[in-house]
Image (cartoon, rainbow, N blue to C red):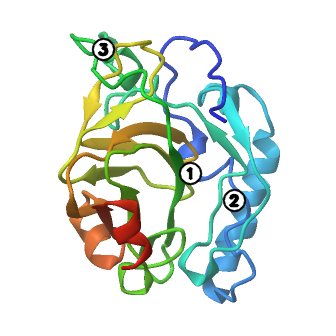
Amino acid sequence: MQAEIPPLRGQPQRTMVDMGMAMYGMAMGHGASHGQGDSHSMQGMAGRSGTGTMMEDAGPIIAHHEKADYGVGNINQAAVQRYRLGDRGTGLEDFTHRVLTYSQLRNVITPPDRHAPVDRTIELHLTGNMDRYMWSFDGDEFSQSKPIDFPLGKRIRLVLVNDTMMEHPIHLHGMFMQLENRQGDRLPYKHTISVLPASRVSLLVTADEPGRWAFHCHLLYHMEAGMFRVVRVAPQEALEHA
């Protein structure tokens, strides 16, 4: 079920959430010994900031989840997931002029498949281990991963949760994604979406282009380090026997 998105409160400044302050501890019990000191330090800072104004300005909380173990490929996890489509882009936080945000994008037409039922929801976590410079989806680098299957002709809701302390521009080849940004029947088309730390982003994809398509972080050094998957679009029976 899609989480209800609370009303926006203007354009919040970039906050300590970008440093992982709303995340679980960095060590995650994986024996990253030289990173544990930083982990304790950041947990202490998070404790001092608590749930005060700096955290509240990061955008409304739209989901909570229990701590999950994605293995050595991930040493952070968002304790809460926030709607951050109203945040300004990186480098534009302190400008005094008006800044366009994802929440304000609006399609000039009503997409023909806007009201098509969602057949499947796929949730992926953007994960990383900066100590070992590993980047991945759900803790698995590309070499360890399996294709993400989109049955041909089906409507897919793709949910991205950024568990890292970095912004990731995620790019899908072959098909456009519709960003669920509270614009009713005028959801904008995107082929790349920048996902801010500790945020949850929801996109709709109509799987109408058969084939194998690249899906990756467009910071190419993250892609080359493992944040890459293949999206496979084929009839359901073909996917079942692949």
Residue beneath the point at 49% across and 78% down: 140
Figure quadrant of the C terminus: bottom left
Residue receiving disc 3: 106
Residue occupied by mark 2: 42
Q: CA distance from mark 3 to mark 1?
A: 30 Å
Q: Earlier in the sequence, mark 1 or mark 2?
A: 1
Q: Are marks 3 and 1 in contact (CB under 8 Å)?
A: no
Q: Position of residue 72 (x, y in %)?
A: 59, 83
Tag 1: residue type? Met
Front tag of 3 and 2: 3
Upstream in sequence: badge 3 or badge 2: 2
| The label number, if any, that marks residue 19 in the structure image | 1
Whether label 1 touches label 2, CB < 8 Å:
yes
Spatial separation of the CA atoms under disc 1 and disc 2: 9 Å
Compared to residue 135, the image places residue 67 above or below, namely above
Tell me: 94 left or right of 138.
Answer: left
Q: Residues within 10 Å of mark 3 (few under 14, many from 20)?
A: some
On screen, residue 201 versus residue 92, left or right, reads: right
Q: Residues within 10 Å of mark 1 (few under 14, many from 20)?
A: some
Residue 93 is left or right of residue 64, and the answer is left
158 is higher (above) or lower (below) than 136:
above
First of labels 3, 1 by sequence position? 1
Q: Between marks 3 and 2, how big is the CA–CA gap?
A: 38 Å
Residue type at mark 2 is Met
Q: Secondary structure at mark 3?
A: loop
Mark 2 secondary-structure assignment: helix
| Callout 1: SS | helix
